[in-house]
Image (cartoon, coloured by chain):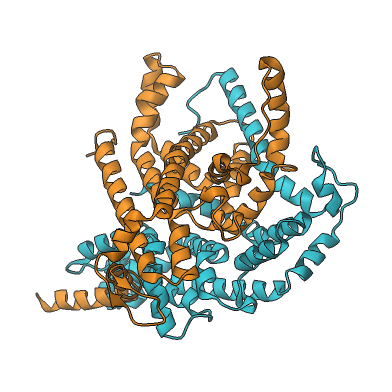
């Protein structure tokens, strides 16, 4: 290395040193420690005692844990595609040049600014079985359906019924898709206009253009938003925590992996067990991300390469 | 590219869908506001009433009173917002500068490491982080909630680096030849052009701190030290879901600052969020 290169290296390291310190203290150390504690009996209050694979063996037989896994997978499997569909549809609509488009964009974005605690409190109220706005809106629809097909449908008591609680949470999430929507909108605006113009000369209609141009050109952004919501939905915590007042919902239907981790760590001080759950979440996210990358590599189209 | 459909009836249809959708998206906000000024009895009517018989503005005063430490919560949240915004802006700018404007050996592989850390979910590492703060005697203080922001978070460094890479290099080279050191180059040739992106980073950090729930939940122990978000949750928990007019008034007070700030910075922010997704 020349003297200049050495100096550059030192200056560079000096500038990134805040991040390096943060990386060591708040990423690398906790990650390794978490892996170590997951093989320990550990309560923070007393030193960790090595127990080998015990925590993982207990996890494998823990039916509550598997329920949390199932709930989390169900939540992710429903809310990720629905969220992507909703944010993409909104972005496509908001890319039209209609009067008041600026106001529309702001309105659809606003809910994503809600602090999670407010979001949870507000939707607890919206989804109230007796006097909630959602059921008030459903009532006339169900009434019509009932009289048309002689059924007897009644609106559910969303968050109090095991079969509906997760759907209540999913709807709450759909209200806040603004962030992904704005990213999609930017992606749409990056698509070169001439592609659409030549398709129009060939007589392509709206759907053809959407399938042949918009979706392929947008695929990297769809992938990005997909991975972001994947990482987010495996950590879902605050909204169900507030909605259930720190519990896990009717018949544990709102018990998610992060909830169960939190309960073990801070309600039962079973920190080693909590670390094992944490590592499980990490590996699950990693595997699903790799899977998504593999599957999408055939469909994601990168311009220029 | 703006609007790839020109036919009038499709644009009318899109307008109608957007108008309907907007009404649906605004309804929860409207419902929150309406409930927040209703007398308690009118929150329980079936079918729901959109126009209250009287506008009970004192619900706000009552909600603040029954939350107990509302003003303390507000002060705590503001203190944390100020500290974390300062910490993030300074440390992320330095780190992003080091990752983009200085050439050094191994820079790009270390940057990949930074990207990889964004994959680690906080719950997966929160136990050792808690243990770390516990051994420092920081549990129950504000330190765990602001000190780490002085050590540059990965996402903000990423966002700023992407922006710094787009700035022209020749002014920096000229300054270097004139004998400026890196600090001066950062200060005179990079920062003056980075106001918008720094504003985005600052706003994101403000939002993250204002909204954070899990952090205050595990690191704060005494009611008086709670942030507004945590205070609202504990209020909701005490109420057991009865005084909805007060809960909605309290929620409105917690959302309001974020929305006001957003309207001031709207243009810059929407562009900033857009770049965070499209550049990579």
User: Would you identify the image quadrant in which residue B106 lies?
Assistant: bottom left
From the top left corner, tell me how far across and down residue B254 is, in percent. 66, 62
Above or below for A61 versus A300: below
Tell which residue pokes out farthest to the right in this image.
Answer: B53
Is residue B134 or residue B106 the one in the foreground? Answer: B134
From the top left corner, tell me how far across and down residue B207 is, in percent. 54, 61
User: Would you identify the image quadrant in which residue B227 lies?
Assistant: bottom right
Q: Could you tell me which residue is drawn at 64 percent across and 40 percent down? A: B25
From the top left corner, tell me how far across and down residue A109 is, in percent. 57, 46
In the image, the chain rendered in cyan is B
Q: Could you tell me which residue is drawn at 69 percent across and 21 percent down? A: A146
Above or below for B19 versus A15: above
| The N terminus of chain A: image quadrant | bottom left
Q: Is residue A303 visible?
A: no
Q: How many marks are shown on the rendered structure?
A: 0
Q: Is residue A129 visible?
A: yes
Tell which residue pokes out farthest to the left in this image.
Answer: A1
Q: In the shown orientation, is residue A190 left or right of residue B262?
A: left
């Amino acid at each position: 290395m020349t003297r200049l290169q050495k100096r550059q290296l030192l200056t560079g390291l000096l500038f990134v040193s805040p991040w390096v310190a943060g990386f060591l203290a708040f990423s690398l150390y906790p990650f390794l420690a978490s892996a170590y504690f997951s093989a320990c009996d550990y309560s923070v209050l007393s030193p960790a005692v090595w127990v080998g694979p015990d925590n993982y063996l207990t996890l494998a037989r823990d039916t509550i844990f598997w329920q949390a896994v199932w709930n989390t997978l169900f939540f992710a499997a429903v809310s990720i595609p629905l969220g992507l569909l909703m944010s993409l549809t909104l972005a496509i609509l908001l890319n039209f040049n209609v009067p008041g488009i600026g106001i529309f964009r702001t309105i659809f974005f606003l809910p994503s600014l809600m602090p999670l605690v407010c979001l949870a409190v507000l939707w607890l109220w919206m989804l109230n079985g007796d006097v909630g706005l959602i059921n008030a809106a459903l009532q006339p629809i169900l009434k019509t359906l009932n009289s048309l097909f002689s059924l007897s449908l009644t609106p559910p008591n969303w968050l109090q019924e095991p079969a509906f609680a997760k759907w209540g949470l999913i709807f709450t999430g759909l209200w806040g898709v603004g962030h992904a929507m704005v990213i999609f909108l930017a992606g749409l605006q990056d698509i070169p206009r001439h592609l659409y113009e030549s398709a129009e000369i060939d007589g392509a209609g709206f759907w053809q253009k959407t399938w042949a141009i918009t979706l392929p050109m947008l695929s990297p952004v769809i992938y990005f938003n997909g991975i972001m919501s994947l990482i987010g939905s495996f950590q879902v915590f605050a909204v169900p925590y507030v909605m259930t007042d720190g519990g896990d919902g009717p018949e544990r239907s709102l018990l998610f992996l992060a909830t169960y981790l939190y309960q073990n760590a801070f309600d039962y001080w079973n920190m080693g067990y909590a670390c094992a759950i944490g590592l499980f979440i990490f590996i699950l996210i990693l595997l699903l991300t790799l899977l998504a990358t593999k599957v999408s590599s055939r469909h994601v189209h990168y311009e220029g390469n | 590219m703006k609007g790839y459909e020109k036919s009038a009836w499709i644009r009318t249809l899109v307008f109608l869908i957007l108008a309907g959708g907007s009404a649906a998206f605004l309804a929860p906000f409207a419902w929150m506001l309406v409930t927040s000024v209703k007398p308690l009895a009118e929150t329980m009517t079936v079918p729901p009433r959109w126009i209250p018989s009287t506008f009970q503005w004192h619900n706000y005063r009552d909600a603040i009173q029954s939350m107990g430490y509302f003003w303390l919560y507000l002060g705590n949240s503001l203190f944390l917002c100020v500290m974390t915004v300062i910490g993030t802006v300074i440390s992320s700018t330095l780190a992003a500068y080091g990752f983009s404007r200085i050439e050094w050996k191994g820079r790009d592989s270390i940057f990949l490491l930074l990207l990889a850390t964004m994959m680690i979910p906080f719950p997966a590492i929160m136990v050792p982080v808690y243990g770390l703060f516990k051994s420092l005697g920081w549990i129950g203080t504000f330190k765990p909630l602001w000190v780490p922001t002085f050590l540059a978070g990965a996402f903000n460094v990423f966002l700023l680096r992407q922006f710094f890479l787009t700035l022209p290099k020749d002014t920096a080279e000229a300054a270097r030849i004139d004998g400026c050191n890196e600090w001066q180059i950062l200060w005179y040739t990079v920062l003056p052009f980075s106001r918008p992106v720094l504003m985005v980073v600052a706003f994101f950090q403000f939002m993250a701190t204002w909204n954070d729930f899990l952090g205050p939940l595990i690191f704060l122990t005494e009611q008086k030290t709670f942030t507004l978000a945590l205070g609202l949750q504990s209020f909701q928990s005490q109420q057991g879901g009865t005084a909805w007019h007060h809960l909605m008034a309290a929620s409105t007070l917690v959302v309001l600052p974020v929305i006001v700030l957003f309207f001031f910075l709207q243009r810059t922010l929407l562009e900033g969020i857009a770049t965070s997704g499209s550049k990579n």
